[in-house]
Image (cartoon, rainbow, N blue to C red):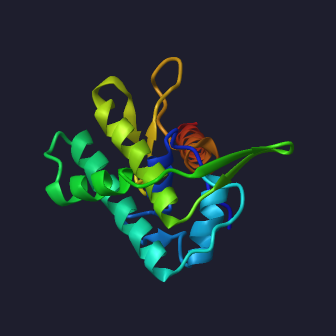
Amino acid sequence: MGFVFVSGNLALDLAGTLKWRRAEPEELLVTPGDLARWSVEAGIATEEPSLDAEGLRRLRALREAVYRLVTGALRGGPWPEDDLRVVNEEARGAPPRLTLTPAGLARRADIEAIASAVARSAAELLGELRHLRVRECARPECTRIFVDRSRGGNRQWCGMEECGNRIKAANYRARRNRAAASG
């Protein structure tokens, strides 16, 4: 299983690791190893950190706090104090450790550094939310949230591969069926 990074923000990409929240949720971070792999694919670490079940629980709790804060903000609602506390506490943690080597930049991260990187990303996003175009995917089943950085500001789907192509194909089939029925 590969992770998808289409949200335009690290914290939103973490939120996207629980898919299809309204229907049959699909958890992508099942084991601590999944989280370690996600941290490398997300660019937080250059090698998989050693993580445990408590670390996985901690990042899932942060993920859910971020999701509730962003979706609440998109609906114009208040930010839950408990979720603000989680993000602020995790943002105070030490960031990933950087080491410049002849081979390039190495990023080392433990659970504190992973949580800190995600929480800082969430804080920056939420702090600038009124200046950004943040949306939920237009595919009804999808609950992924993304930053719309398209030139026209009219991005509708989290990504073309998973949602956009399916919507476009369904629309095409519907048009073709209507044309066949009328003609």
List the single residue furthest toward the bottom. Answer: 53
Give the image location of residue 72, x and y in percent.
22, 48
- Of 18 and 51, nearer the camera is 51
Residue 135 appears left or right of 106: left
Residue 168 left/right relative to 58:
right
Q: Residue visible at 86% across and 45% down?
A: 103
Residue at horizontal 46 percent and vertical 25 percent from the top: 154
The answer to whether any part of residue 22 appears in the image is: no
> Quadrant where the N terminus lies?
bottom right
Report if residue 82 is visible in the image: yes
* Residue appearing at x 35%, y 67% in the figure: 61
Q: For residue 180, which quarter of the picture? A: top right
Image quadrant of residue 133?
Answer: top left
Depth order, front residue of 157/115: 115
Towards the viewer: 57 or 96: 96
Instruction: Give the image location of residue 2, x and y in percent.
Output: 68, 62
Question: How many numbered marks, from 0 up?
Answer: 0
* Relative vertical location of residue 62 with respect to residue 140 in this rendering, above or below: below
Could you tell me residue 82's position as x and y percent? 19, 60
In the figure, 28 relative to 95: above or below? below
Residue drawn at the location 55% of the way across and 49% of the way down: 163
The x and y percentages for residue 25 are 43, 70
